[in-house]
Image: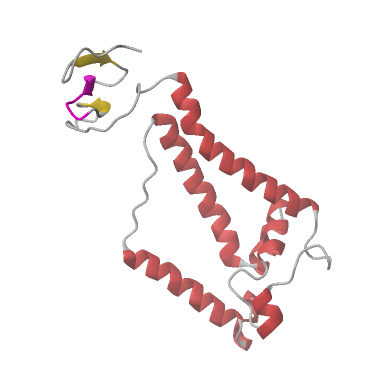
Amino acid sequence: MHELHGPGSVLKRRTGWVGTLERRKDQVGRTGWVGTADRGTGRVGRTGWSGTADSGTGRVRRLATPIGILAAVAGAFAYVGSVDPNEPGHYPVCPLLKLTGVLCPGCGGLRSAHAFITGDLGAALEANAIATVGYFLFAAVWVLWLVRAWRGQPLRIGLAPVWWWGVGAVLLIFTVVRNLPFGSALAP
């Protein structure tokens, strides 16, 4: 590591980013990176960057989380694919269904996942249509996350509150309709 000489001294260091980062030790003893760190986006004056910018190790670290999440989801789907939830005794019963007899939005999700992983999309939709749509949505967001992580960009999905309310409304309507006699096609 480079040594700083006296209070307020500045050491400039070139990185893979456009411009330089400065490592400064000010009068109160705080040490950190300051200065601009523009990665060709035209934004200037961003501070608070830490360490060197892009290296092979940095890319591996950025990809570790999305790949780890995919590995966990794939492991869960592999387990559900190998242990059939249609056979009683392998999985616990939904507590809401057991106590009240009401189907929650997740009821049938394991059967849906089993059918999905075994390639029966029709059975997956019959077991839980919302969960099946969620599998495709997860895949799309995961691919977006992986591409952005590869490029060194954060995954920011800023949904307005109206979208969250809309998702909640769809889940509520789905739950109510699947518990009514005319909505029995949505029940698992």
Q: Is residue 144 above or below residue 29?
A: below
Which colour style is shown? secondary structure
Describe residue 68's horizontal placement relative to residue 4 as left or right.
right
Identify which residue, 25 or 49, lies in the foreground: 25
Residue at the spot x=42%, y=19% of the render?
Answer: 55
Measured from the top left, where is residue 154 in percent x and y?
37, 39
The answer to whether residue 38 shows anywhere in this view is no
For this orientation, the residue located farthest to the bottom is 181
Query: Which secondary structure dominates the residues rendered in magenta?
Result: strand
Describe residue 117's horizontal placement relative to residue 106 as left or right.
right
Q: In this view, does 96 lie above or below 22?
A: below
Identify the image quadrant of the N terminus.
Answer: top left
Magenta run includes residue 91: no
Residue at the spot x=28%, y=21% of the render?
Answer: 17
Measured from the top left, where is residue 133 in percent x and y?
55, 60
- Which of the 4 quarters of the picture holds residue 159? bottom left
Residue stretch rendered in magenta on the structure: 19-28
Identify which residue, 129 or 6, lies in the foreground: 6
How many numbered marks does the figure carry?
0
Measured from the top left, where is residue 30 in percent x and y?
25, 29
Measured from the top left, where is residue 100 in percent x and y?
66, 85
The answer to whether residue 162 shows anywhere in this view is yes
Magenta run includes residue 20: yes
Identify the image quadrant of the C terminus.
Answer: bottom right
Residue at the spot x=64%, y=82% of the render?
Answer: 102
- Which of the 4 quarters of the picture holds residue 26? top left
Q: In this view, does 6 lie above or below 123?
A: above
